[in-house]
Image (cartoon, grey):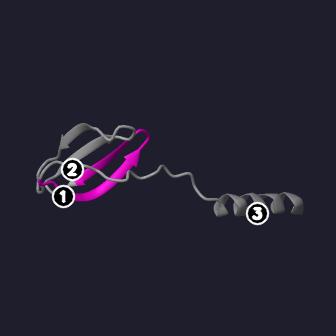
Amino acid sequence: MILGLLVIVALLVTRFWSEPDLPALPEAIALPEGARATAFTQGAGWYAVVTEDGRILVYDRKTGALRQVVETAPEGR
């Protein structure tokens, strides 16, 4: 039982001390004229920027091309 506990502790320690495999951030993002970024998020194969005017700009990770623009509802609705 003690050996099992030591194995569990060793696995937890090695798991938490290892560096996570995070996707690389893009070097630069070309936003449309006048757009200012307020937030950034990313997923598998894409990343997105939220702008001050409430748009979500979704870009392709490989090419950097704008894939989709999502208009959000104005604040207060």
Q: Of the residues shown, which amino acid type is indicated by label 3? A: Val
Name the side, left or right, on which 30 lies relative to 22: left
Mark sitting earlier along the chain (1/3) = 3
Q: Of the residues shown, which amino acid type is indicated by label 1? A: Arg
Mark sitting earlier along the chain (3/2) = 3
Marker disc for residue 31: 2
Is 42 above or below relative to 5? above
Which residue was labeled with disc 3? Answer: 9
Image spot of residue 45 (x, y percent): 41, 38
Which residue was labeled with disc 1? Answer: 36
Which of 25/6 is in front? 25
Graded by Cα atoms within 10 Å as few (under 14), some (14 to 19) or many (20 or more), the crowding at tag 2 reads few
Q: Give the label, 3 or 2, closer to the camera.
A: 2
Kindly state the secondary structure of the residue where label 3 is placed.
helix
Kindly state the secondary structure of the residue where label 2 is placed.
loop
Q: Which residues are magenta?
A: 34-50
